[in-house]
Amino acid sequence: MRKVLFFTTIFCFFFECFSNEIPSDRSYYQKGVDFYKDASFDKAFIIFYNLSEKGDRDAQFNITNMFSEGIGTTQNYPEALKWCWLCALGGEKKCYKKIAGIISRVDEKSIITKKKEVEVFLENKMNINQDVKYALMLGFWYEQFSPEKDLEMAYLWYSVAVTGGIYKAMKKRNSVGDSLEVEILIDLQNKASKIFSDIKYFSKKETGEQ
């Protein structure tokens, strides 16, 4: 009995210590802010980058600025554009306002490269997290943000979002669908159904390198 109590105590102590070592995203973000205020920009950059990969909009906004200005990292306009796009797709208006200024500093080849990275990022998030909010973001991307607009892809992803219960995407889906031919719509509807089934019932790996 003493052995059981001993090991239970050790386990609880270990678990408590381990739990305390894993900060919440908000406290982790605040640590990045504190590093930034202390001019430890490289440390702040690492934190904001990690959170940006998780989809944190505030961190994505910060990373956009740090890449754009070369603070805590090497100045990199294409990377700034990528994170600015993702931040804006998450609904952050201050990121949306920065897109035009950043994209004017990026060459066409890099724009296309970052375009593909944004698409892979969103699809990976959707598949791994099984979260159709990323389908809605992909719909917005192909209809409004992408340098190569694609209404068929926009309809496809809006359809996935609606199927997943995001009914505010219904109006966007129908609006885009009005411009497409019936045969194309039927094909896209079948594809959307399969994509949603895969998201809901199967664990997915990343779709490709970012």
Image (cartoon, rainbow, N blue to C red):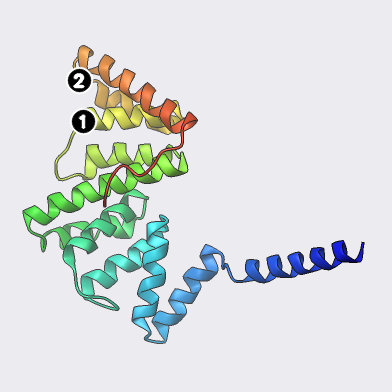
Residue depicted at 16% across the width and 62% down the height? 101
Tell me the amino acid under the disc marked 1.
Leu
Residue depicted at 33% across the width and 55% down the height? 87
Q: Residue 167: x percent and y percent?
A: 44, 29
Query: Of 154 and 8, which appears nearest the observer?
Result: 8
Query: Of 16 and 100, which appears nearest the observer?
Result: 16
> Taking 181 as reference, is 114 above or below it?
below
| Tag of residue 132 | none
Q: Residue 77: x percent and y percent?
A: 17, 65
Query: Of 74 and 37, which appears nearest the observer?
Result: 74
Q: Can see residue 33?
A: yes
Element type at marker 1?
Answer: helix
Residue depicted at 11% across the width and 60% down the height? 106
Q: Is residue 188 left or right of residue 76?
A: right
Element type at marker 2?
Answer: loop
User: Which residue is label 2 attached to?
Assistant: 180
Tell me the amino acid under the disc marked 2.
Leu
Is the residue marked by circle 1 packed among few (<14), some (14-19), or many (20+) residues within 10 Å?
some
Compute the Cα span from label 2 to label 1.
Answer: 8 Å
Asked whether the residues under the numbered discs 2 and 1 touch, taking CB atoms below 8 Å apart as contact, a structural biologist would say yes
